[in-house]
Amino acid sequence: MRQDPLLASIGGMLQKCRRAEAWLRQAGLPIFFARLPVWGLCLHYCFMMTGKTRRISRIAERITRWMETITGLSNNEKARLELLDMDLGMRSDIESTKRTLQLLRELSVDVGALFDSIGYQSLLLARTQAKFMDVVDDACTTATRLQRALEMHDARALALLREMEEHERGALRGSEPAQTLEKAQSQDAASHDSASPGLDGARSASAPQSLAASPPATAASRQAPVAASGRD
């Protein structure tokens, strides 16, 4: 049995109730009246455990709603990248909640053993203990499922992010040759445009010279027949 302030308190009260029961029996009271202090302590404990059971039930409902939310995000293609537990904060909180619930369950078992140690049997105590343990076990099971769902959701989201990143890299690699070809074509066009004005200038400069040289040759050809006819 673990050392806990709650156990120590209940154990001390049980010892006092047991001494009171023995004194009342010695005083001649029936067992029914002599056990009233123990019954009162048991009833107080059952009321306390009933309140804890209700609170744990509400915690289990929240965990269930979180489970539904994570499942919905995983099934929705547009929301698969939402609610990533990258720092493991949510899973750590869930694990802390599970440890607390398991500790309460162990304390409940130890308290039941304390009542058994004085020979006290109660149907109300047994039912309260059983219901509390069932709620705690269900909450721990749901919390474990939520942790697994978070792990699977994060794994799928990270795989999708890697796929998107590789696709973007492939698109960038495919666009580089096209950009290089376009740049080379623009450079060739620029060099061709810069060389064309020189050729046109050379052609325009040679054309007047040929026209200027042709008239003297024509005049000489016309004067030669005239000279020949004078001689005749």
Image (spheres, grey):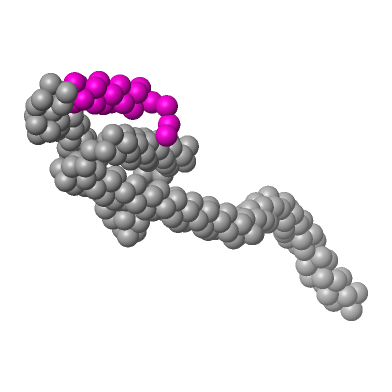
Residue lying furthest bottom: 232
- Look at the image and tell me whether residue 130 can be seen: yes
Query: Is residue 231 shown left or right of residue 86?
Result: right
Residue at the image position 76 percent from the left and 60 percent from the top: 210
Point out the stretch of residues depicted in magenta. 1-23
Query: Is residue 112 shown left or right of residue 89?
Result: left
Task: Report which quarter residue 216 is drawn in.
Answer: bottom right
Residue at the image position 42 percent from the left and 27 percent from the top: 3
> As displayed, is residue 122 above or below residue 191?
above
Residue at the image position 21 percent from the left and 25 percent from the top: 22
- Look at the image and tell me whether residue 51 can be seen: no
Query: Is residue 194 shown left or right of residue 170?
Result: right
Q: Closest to the observer: 78 or 195?
A: 78
Query: Is residue 48 shown left or right of residue 170?
Result: left
Q: Closest to the observer: 166 or 189?
A: 166
**Quadrant into which the C terminus falls:** bottom right
Task: Report which quarter residue 46 is drawn in.
Answer: top left
**Residue 150 at x, y percent in the picture:** 40, 49
**Quadrant into which the N terminus falls:** top left
Question: Does the segment drawn in magenta span residue 20?
Answer: yes
